[in-house]
Amino acid sequence: MTDSEAPVLDLAGLSKTYGRRRGGVQAVRDVSLSVGRGEVYGFLGPNGAGKSTTIRMLIGLIAPTSGEARLFGEDLRTRPDVLRRVGSLVDGGNFYPFLSGRRNLEVLAKTQGRGAERIDELLDRVGLARDSKRKVKGYSTGMRQRLGVAAALLGDPDLVILDEPVNGLDVAGIQEMRDLIRGLAVDQGKTVFLSSHLLHEVQQACDRVAIISKGEIVRESSIADLLRQDDGLRIDAAPVEIAEAALASRWPVERDGDALVVRATRAEAPEVVRRLVGAGADLFRLSPEQRNLEEVFLSITREPGDA
Amino acid sequence: MLEALSAEALKMRTHKATWFLVWLFPIAFTIIMLISIAVGMAGAGKPEQHSVAQWIDSTTIIWSVPNNAVGRYLISAFVAVLFAGEYGWNTWKLIVPHRRRASLIAAKYALTILLFAFSFALTAALLIALNFADDALTGDTIPAGLSAASLWGAHSKAALSAAGPLLIAVGYASLAAILTRSTIAALVVAIAATSIESIVYSFGPPLALNFPSIVWPLYHLLPGHHIANLAEYIRTGHSLKRAFLDGRVVDLSWTTSLGILVAWAAALYAATFAAFARQDIN
């Protein structure tokens, strides 16, 4: 497989256990996923699900206990130099507080073995040109985040890994970040792997997503498929208990106030109606119910018994 | 490697730790010398006559900093900031993905050694210049026989004697920094290691009377005596003989001392590289 054919990012059975094997804490368990060139890939999960641990394994900060991470077809363990093609933002941007924003990027450029030619352009692009000579310790969270994006793009990477890139940004900043992320993929052909808890942003920015919960990937698909899979029918029927009993034996049913949400497809709507009528329930309204990513995410990751 | 070194230099050149722990030496010694010159000029005493050895010794004093426990504490403090600071600032995450870990650690070692070597050399040059100025301004006579060759020879030997303790001090502090991931903890561990070494070297001979089975092997194992033995060889060409109160005498060849110091330095540096290579950065 040539470099251009290989997935940009390919994880196979990636696991991480902290502590001794017996009694250790398994933070990430058997994570496998693949990201193609030019994709914007969302990595979602509740706090403590293993997102950050997975991302740290991708950029060589944490050694996996088992499994394999391949970047551009190269095994990260044997070819760590492949990380030269990767730009990353983790923990909202970590910088030397006693240096200016510009000087931080200069240090990073030297560490990467590159010149400082792109620094001014990038500072301008993330809106920090005027504050570039101020020490980072005086930056707001949002400014650090934007400097982190500039740092991630400094080496003109082919793969950009962003861990919670919109944390600390205001509404306008979030909009700019979303445009920037889409622009990286659409205009520059870069691949973006991003984790975020702002699901609306992920829904708008990403092509595909993986949802991780308790260290395991529980769903992976395109946004469209994920939402389609979770389509349903909203039913207004009475008595609601009889209607629920009539449908629950066939489809997953959730109560939403006085209404019922049935995980049935549009094609199954006639059968839903027949069952309701057969059970003696009065049907007042039946309409398609499309959940957004946040609702899908919550339904997948919610603990049994959660409200 | 040069790029990583250049990045380290760019990062640390304006840091307070560099001013207070590295450039401290030329600044402090210059101030002390200027005060001494001012006092000499204000005094009405007759001009002093120094021997060549006295004159040169007053300029090589800077090289004794790494041989001195307090000097080693200052070196340890800088190393603790340089290595453990990355954990405190959370900046390993910024640089580790972009360069091999061994290269990042090697760059920190290179910067430390170069900075202290430059600082001590600059201080030595200033001390020589200020000593000449002192003689000229206070009317002291420059001793006959003082030459560039004698100065160079004395400073080369003093610098060579400083190399061992400098490397050991850097080794203690860097390993402690990587293992503890804390500047304060690294400094405390490095100070403790340096102090134990100094105590065993200074008080080993009398303590051997009460704890011979512990003190004798410790005295031979720790770097203290070997640093002093090598310095003695470099200075006089003879070994350092130390009589213990239980009657035994420590008299080791320079090759033995050099071998033990090299083993210490190799172990400390290798352990630092290995610990960092395997470390998860969360």
Image (cartoon, rainbow, N blue to C red):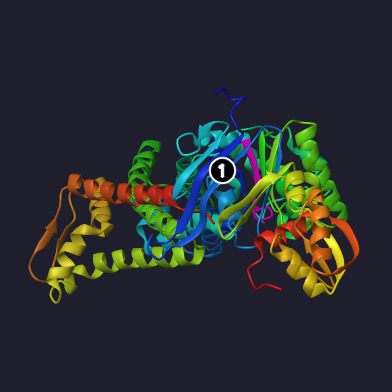
Residue A74, visible in the rendered structure: yes
Mark 1 secondary-structure assignment: helix
Q: Is residue A217 left or right of residue A17?
A: right
Q: Residue at x 74, y 34 (%)?
A: A118
Quick one: which residue is furthest to the right in this view? A284
What percent of the width, then of the height, locates residue B86? 55, 54
How many marks overall?
A: 1
Q: Looking at the picture, tell me which residue is in the foreground, A3 or B12.
A: A3
* Chain name for mark 1: B
Q: Looking at the picture, tell me which residue is in the foreground, B204 or A113.
A: A113
What is the crowding at mark 1: few (fewer than 14 residues within 10 Å), some, or many (at least 20)?
many
Q: Where is B33 relative to A243, above or below?
A: above
Which region of the structure is painted magenta? A86-95
Q: Is residue A131 left or right of residue B189?
A: right
Quick one: which residue is furthest to the top in this view? A2
Q: Where is A265 relative to A107, above or below?
A: below
Quick one: which residue is furthest to the left in this view? B247
Instruction: State the image quarter where residue A250 is shown.
Output: bottom right
What percent of the width, then of the height, locates residue B23? 55, 53
Q: Is residue A176 left or right of residue B47?
A: right
Q: Residue at x 58, y 45 (%)?
A: B95
What percent of the width, then of the height, locates residue B17? 56, 57
Instruction: State the image quarter where residue B90 is shown.
Output: bottom right
Quick one: which residue is furthest to the bottom in this view? B210
- Secondary structure that dominates the magenta span: loop
What percent of the width, then of the height, locates residue A282? 88, 69
Q: Looking at the picture, tell me which residue is in the foreground, B1 or A57.
A: A57
Identify the residue position indicated by label 1 in the image: B97
Q: Looking at the picture, tell me which residue is in the foreground, A277 or A248.
A: A277
Q: Please state which amino acid type lies under the numbered disc 1.
A: Pro
Q: Is residue B118 magenta?
A: no
